Image: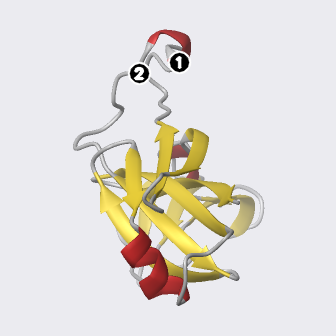
Amino acid sequence: MSSGFGARVIVLSDAIRIQLDAEPETLTAISELNSPGTQIAFLGVSDTPNLPLAPAHLIADKQLNGDVLISWQRRGRLSGNRWPTGEIPLDSLPEQYSVSVMDAGTVARIITTNTTQFNYSIEHQIADFGTAPSQFEFSVTQNSATLGCGHAATGVFN
């Protein structure tokens, strides 16, 4: 059922209906029992709780050639307690991560990878910072094919 405003409505009874509004994404319960049209509940709807968890154990190690190897461990809601014994199963396929490198809070580079590490080459560091930086911040997200980028974990190379 649809209202004249383009909202989707679920009619629970002649007296109560649930309306899903498109902008912003909200659920509103409306009662027709006592005072017609009285709003009795309002709930924001978001995919945020379902987004992939932030990766854990971020490490940034400088290599002998000047590259910085950024690595992490994925996290998941399905059998997610295997850290001591190895990688956990994937929550969604394909396995994908986004790594953002920041220069004073501004994103200098974003890459996407299908592994739990990223080699930040000395050439890319110089292109992004003008010289090999002694310190920079970075963030890593696990990505979902259906929900997009998940929650970010942040780290600092120094």
Residue 126 placement (x, y as % from top left):
47, 82
| Residue that carries the numbered disc 1 in the rendered image | 83
Quadrant in which the N terminus is drawn: bottom left
Q: Residue at x 43, y 70 (%)?
A: 122
Is 70 situated left or right of 57 in this image?
Answer: left
- Seen from the viewer's position, the closer of residues 153 and 77 is 153
Q: Residue at x 70, y 60 (%)?
A: 158
Mark 1 crowd level (few <14, some 14–19, many ≥20, 10 Å Cα): few
Q: Against 84, is 76 above or below?
A: below
**Marks 2 and 1 in Cβ contact (< 8 Å):** yes
* Residue type beneath disc 1: Trp
Residue 36 visible to the viewer = no
Q: Secondary structure at mark 1?
A: helix
Q: Which of the 4 image quarters holds residue 32? A: bottom right
Q: Secondary structure at mark 2?
A: loop
Mark 2 crowd level (few <14, some 14–19, many ≥20, 10 Å Cα): some
Q: Residue at x 76, y 66 (%)?
A: 35
Q: Which label sits on residue 16?
A: none
| Residue that carries the numbered disc 2 in the rendered image | 88
Is 32 situated left or right of 81 in this image?
Answer: right
Is 119 situated left or right of 125 in this image?
Answer: left
Q: Residue at x 56, y 48 (%)?
A: 61
Residue 79 placement (x, y as % from top left):
45, 16
For the residues labelled 2 and 1, the Cα–Cα distance comes to 7 Å
